[in-house]
Image (tube, rainbow, N blue to C red):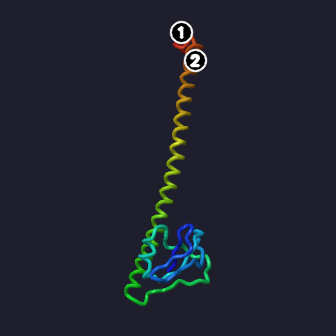
Amino acid sequence: MWFAFPPGAEVITVEQQTFVAEAMDVENRRCFRAPAHFAPRILAIGGFALAGEITDKTLSDISDSSTPDGQAIEKLTQELAAREAQIKGLQEDYNRSRAAELALSKELEEEKRLRAAAEAKAAELEEQLEDAVPPAAAGKKG
């Protein structure tokens, strides 16, 4: 199972087993492989996280699915990674929606400003028209 080091960390020891960075993930974090049954201990340490996709495709993951506990941990870890990806996607959707809302809000304010300017100009032209056409001439029909 792949894990990502927090910035500045390069080594971790879990149950007297030392792990060092072996690869980089797509988020440009240093990553290491450890058995899945260490996942709860590693992820409980601040800054450590599941790694993203590893950029070096020649490196394989460590599989620890030989025991029921290992299988359960592997399954739960995969579910956690899927939920984290889902949350990230939802956050991106929210950010896009919020940006669109702000753009529409600015557009609406500009439309309101233009409408107010047009109404003021129409009132001014009406007043000029009333001043230009004598009241008696306005009432006469051809």
Q: CA distance from mark 1 to mark 2?
A: 14 Å
According to the picture, the residue beneath numbered tag 2 turns out to be 129
- The quadrant of the picture occupied by the C terminus is top right
The residue positioned 51% from the left and 13% from the top of the image is 139
Dot 1 alpha-carbon crowd within 10 angstroms: few under 14, some 14 to 19, many 20 or more: few
Q: Amino acid at mark 2?
A: Leu
The residue positioned 49% from the left and 83% from the top of the image is 17
Q: Is residue 129 above or below residue 109?
A: above
Dot 2 alpha-carbon crowd within 10 angstroms: few under 14, some 14 to 19, many 20 or more: few
The residue positioned 48% from the left and 64% from the top of the image is 88
* Image mark for residue 3: none
Residue 8 in picture, x, y percent from top left: 57, 68
Residue 118 in picture, x, y percent from top left: 56, 29
According to the picture, the residue beneath numbered tag 1 turns out to be 136
Question: Viewer-proximal residue, 20 or 139?
Answer: 20
**SS at circle 1:** helix
The picture quadrant where one finds residue 28 is bottom right
Q: Is residue 76 above or below residue 111?
A: below
**SS at circle 2:** helix
Q: Amino acid at mark 1?
A: Ala
Task: Give the farthest residue toward the front.
Answer: 16
Q: Earlier in the sequence, mark 1 or mark 2?
A: 2
The picture quadrant where one finds residue 9 is bottom right
The residue positioned 46% from the left and 62% from the top of the image is 90
